[in-house]
Amino acid sequence: MILNNFDWNDFLQNTWQKKPLLVKNALPAELFDVLTPEELAGLAMEEDVESRIVIEKDGATPWELKRGPFTEDDFTSTPATHWSLLVQGVNHWLPEAAELLTAFDAIPRWRLDDVMVSFAPEEGGVGPHYDNYDVFLIQGRGKREWRLTTQHCTPENYIPNMALRLMENFPVEETYILEAGDMLYLPAKVGHWGISRSPDCMTWSVGYRSLSAREMLEHFADFAARESLPVKWYQDPNWLDNQEHPSNISNHSVAQAKAALLAMLNDEATLHRWFGQFITEPQGHQGSLLTPPPERTLPLDRFKRRIHQGEGLSADLMSRWVQDTTTNPRLLHINGETTTVENDVEAALLDRLCSQFDHPADELLIYVTENTANLDLLHGLWQAGILHWLESE
């Protein structure tokens, strides 16, 4: 899938994480017919789907937040205008939403958070706010007005005593009207306020993870304990030159503590292994839904025979796959776990596994007919419950 009226080279050099960009007719409007407002509401009624309803109200509390799963009564009791339904992770449930992500492959897949879809009648929205991540806002149906600001995008500007983090002061700097197929890119910390200008407004949001240094340090500490990394010990400085008083902490003492920590981070092989696990580990609500089945047992020859008989393989739409081809041996990271890849496994098979969810048998036969390393990798991933039979499971 390719974005229209869009130059990735120019965008990544001049716009990404720098400034907003409006792209008219970025994608065909009919692509978004795969999901109706009624079907989105149906998703929001499912126990495993993360969803919210935001209602704009009068009075001391101008916005109300409700969390799903919802019932039909929740939707029949909503007002005629000034409310919005938001459903997270639609790409985990709808294959067409996962396919939409191929239009954004100029940015690594592991940077992705999820695809959120919202519905709003006239005047509906979630209020003025800013995010700490980059997002592409694509209009699927109807019209939405977007008001933008770069001012006061700080926690100090949140409306007090609200469940939603909405901006109290929002001086509008730019305004855009998006119609079906239009796209608006917003970098992190640009305030935006979307307001429906039609009775059938549906917006698709392709959002990217914000990676904080604190989150990475916490995860690396857990990784170090789990992997039993070699201990790096603190080494005292020369106390003859660095001890003015028994209660003092000298600059050299802190430098030695920093050196011990950096010694762990300077091991490139360890860092690559940790980072792959960090960026593929299921996030929040998603993590509780990824429960692979017990390991399966099926002899390799019978596994190969089933593929030759026309059975393909597929990965869960929630799974996260990345490869690290800079290491030797190569590493395949899936849902926070690492698999070592034999040198004889074809790069084209790894590329396919990390970019597609469904693998029909006729396409797999290209890789498994002659190459036993390819077959061994697929067999191992199937045995571990990471891949499933496409047609029979």
Image: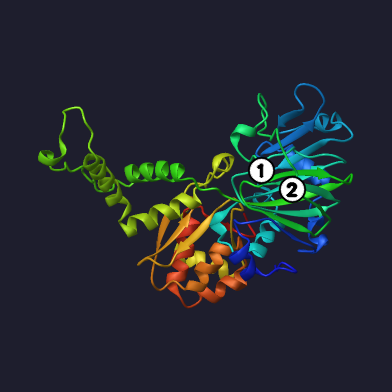
Going from the N terminus, do you reach mark 2 or mark 1 first?
Answer: 1
| Residue shown at the point (33%, 45%) measured from the top left | 224
| Residue shown at the point (72%, 39%) measured from the top left | 170
221 left or right of 236? Answer: right
Q: Residue furthest front?
A: 244
| Residue shown at the point (86%, 51%) measured from the top left | 142
135 left or right of 324? Answer: right
Secondary structure beneath dot 2 equals loop
**Quarter assignment of residue 372:** bottom left
| Residue shown at the point (79%, 59%) measured from the top left | 182
Is the Cβ of the residue at disc 2 closer than 8 Å to that at disc 1?
Answer: yes
Q: How many other residues sit within 10 Å of disc 1, few (<14), some (14-19) or many (≥20)?
A: some
Q: Which mark is residue 255?
A: none
Task: Where is residue 205? Give x, y as percent.
Answer: 70, 51
Front residue of this view, candidates 137 and 283: 137
Q: Amino acid at mark 1?
A: Gln
Quadrant where the C terminus is found in the figure: bottom right
Front residue of this view, candidates 365 and 159: 159
| Residue at the disc numbered 1 | 151
Q: Amino acid at mark 2?
A: Glu
| Residue at the disc numbered 2 | 173
Distance (Cα) linking label 2 and label 1: 9 Å
Quadrant where the N terminus is found in the figure: bottom right
Can the viewer see residue 205?
Answer: yes
